[in-house]
Image (cartoon, helix red, strand yellow):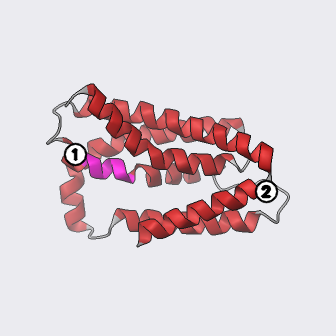
Amino acid sequence: MSLWILFLLAIGLSMDAFSLALIYGTLNMKETYHRWMSLFVGIFHFFMPILGYTLGKWLFQIIPMNPQTIAGVIFVILSIEMLASIKKEETIKILENIYSICLFAFTVSIDSFSIGIGLGSLTTHISLAAIIFAITSATFTYLGVKLGNLFAKKYGKISTLIGSIILFCLGLYYIF
């Protein structure tokens, strides 16, 4: 498999992280959390395909739960929490601790785990693929948060409303 194909696959895997980071960027989080989000998304996008490659088939035999359904439920809950924050004057604290950032990173990296299961049939360079996935997803996450932040400064609370609607729709998409 060529580097070009791995990079295109990495971009595809990074789109959910980018879109959710764009939404979270509208919440006016501290700059430190922008970096932490990006770092953890990159770390999870590195390890998830490797785990998928080595343990994926075995794990899905034990746990018959669809991981996208889990992600959908999490997205719906977060969107409702974002909607509730619109009336508050303080900034929402959805992703302002290490556990919530890890949960976010895990949620947007589930697809990398699934890709990892079949990655062995596409390339023998699993580590190289994981590195490309990590760098691409961390970069897209950071860009998404920054763009969302710019949007929030220009449009205020309406950006949070739009972000929560998008997140809710993504959640329903993953559930159904």
Magenta-colored span: 110-116
Q: In which quadrant of the rendered view does residue 50 lie?
A: top left
Q: Residue furthest bottom?
A: 176
- Element type at marker 1? helix
Residue 76 rendering spot, x and y as whole percentages: 55, 68
In this figure, which residue is indicated by the disc labeled 2?
A: 157
Q: Is residue 143 left or right of residue 1?
A: right
Residue 97, can we see it? Answer: no
Q: In which quadrant of the rendered view does residue 62 lie?
A: bottom left
Label 1 Cα crowd, 10 Å radius (few <14 / some 14-19 / many 20+): many
The magenta stretch spans residue 115 = yes
Label 2 Cα crowd, 10 Å radius (few <14 / some 14-19 / many 20+): some
- Element type at marker 2? helix
Residue at image position (36%, 38%) is 10
**Mark 2 and mark 1 in contact (Cβ < 8 Å)?**
no
| Residue closer to the observer: 105 or 79 | 79
Of helix, strand and loop, which mostly describes the magenta segment? helix
Q: Nearer the viewer, mark 1 or mark 2?
A: 2
Residue 54 rendering spot, x and y as whole percentages: 20, 46
Residue at image position (58%, 41%) is 144
| Residue closer to the observer: 91 or 159 | 159
Location of the N terminus (image quadrant)? top left
Tell me which amino acid carries mark 2: Lys
Q: In which quadrant of the rendered view does residue 149 lie?
A: top right
The magenta stretch spans residue 48 = no
In this figure, which residue is indicated by the disc labeled 1?
A: 53
Q: CA distance from mark 1 to mark 2?
A: 42 Å
Tell me which amino acid carries mark 1: Tyr
Location of the C terminus (image quadrant)? bottom left
Residue at image position (29%, 33%) is 6
Q: Which mark is residue 44?
A: none
Q: Residue furthest right?
A: 89
